[in-house]
Image: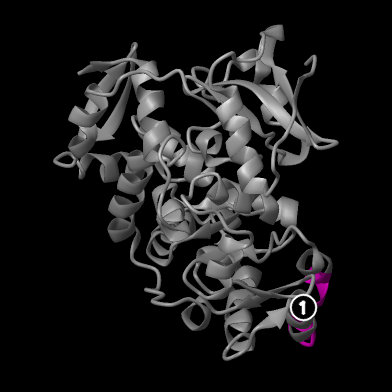
Amino acid sequence: MRLTWDQVFAWRLRRQFVAARAASVPEIVERLCGVQAQVTSAAEMAVALRVSAPEPGALVRELDGGTLIKTWAMRGTLHALTPDLAAACLSLLASARTWEKPAWQRNFGASPAEVAALTEQVRRVLDGAVLTREELVDALLADPAFHRLGEQLRSGWGALLKPLAWQGVICHGPAQGNKITFGDPARLIKGWPGLPEPDAAAPPAITAYLGAYGPATPEVFDAWLSRGSLRKTLLRRWFSELAETLTEVEVEGRRGYLLTEHVEELAATEPTTSVHLLGGFDQYVLGPGTADTVLLPGDHRAKVSRTAGWISPIVVAGGRIVGTWELADETVAVRMFDGAPLPKKGLDAAVEHLAAVLGRGSLPVAAVAS
């Protein structure tokens, strides 16, 4: 079956609750296969822009209540996830065993044996406890075996704790003031299922991803999940075992997989001219990845994917990324790519929606040279 990118983007906008709102925060987080939560305010905006009745702090309340889990997941970054999908994705990430690779050991200074010992010690330390980073590190460094890892353990990047998160041993807990906490998912998260075997984890992870970001190839799925770290033979097998669930389609010369149940719906989708303002680190671009030149022109990638992993707020028109924006002095400052004019139709509605989410009566708009 042949489709157009304009159809795909219009379909994704609806599937991802950009063009049609969701009833609840967990529904959004589940559909998007998680919301990147490195920056809490960006994660809150991602869900607020998509929910029918946005409320300040809605995502954090779901996390604190244990309905959602916050942990290091896709691409080693912090995400808010539903428990079942988190367990599936973490299982696949753990199966890659990236911490056993020489490059990881060189960068972070811990051997596989040390990571294994750290995993067991953290499991014991967090048994029945929720600890701040400082409390957790102090408890670990009470054992001389971990002294040489002290600097990495104290690092805010959490490199040594990520393999533990991928194995389901640790997750973020409710903040204590401005301090983050860690705990055992089995204790903190309602209905935590534990990690399934990778072969059982692959189908729900793959189908959830394609349900929001399809059509896509196995390689694009792997880039989204693990930066391409999964074993290619396993990846191909997992997709092939879903042959009765997936359909291969062609979109303007590019082939990819879509859930069979969505093929007719996508084929019937009409292109859209709608305009949307999405926040920083938004899943609309992170799902397919900033390297997708159909979604984000390669010449402008650096304006969206910036230094230190920062992802800019984006202007989306017709489903394609056409510029960036920021809130400066109570004004929405829009930088259109290639000096294009501001969209004549749809921008006012997008700004009005943004203002409502931010609790502002209105927001002026200004075009800024890029």
User: Residue 269: percent from the left, percent from the top?
Assistant: 28, 24
- Tag 1 secondary structure: helix
Across the whole image, how many numbered discs are drawn on residues? Answer: 1
Q: Is residue 326 above or below residue 186?
A: above
Furthest toward the left, the residue is 244
Is residue 283 among what the camera can see? yes
Magenta stretch: helix, strand or loop mostly: helix
- Residue at point 68% right, 26% down? 324
Q: In the image, which residues are magenta? A: 140-150
- Residue at point 80% right, 14% down? 369
Q: Residue 242 sits in which quadrant?
A: top left
User: Residue 287: percent from the left, percent from the top?
Assistant: 49, 38
Near-viewer residue (357 or 135): 357
Near-viewer residue (93 or 54): 54
Left/right placement of residue 262 relative to residue 181 reads left
Q: Is the C terminus in the top left, top right, bottom left or bottom right quadrant?
A: top right
User: Residue 329: percent from the left, percent from the top?
Assistant: 85, 36
Q: Is residue 1 above or below residue 196?
A: above
- Residue at point 34% right, 67% down? 196
Near-viewer residue (187 or 212): 212
Q: Is residue 176 magenta?
A: no
Read off the residue under disc 1.
137
Near-viewer residue (104 or 32): 32
Name which residue type carries label 1. Val
- Residue at point 48% right, 76% down? 189
Within 10 Å of disc 1 (Cα), the crowding (few <14, some 14-19, many 20+) is some
User: Residue 206: percent from the left, percent from the top?
Assistant: 34, 46
Is residue 279 among what the camera can see? no
Furthest toward the front, the residue is 361
Q: Is residue 142 magenta?
A: yes
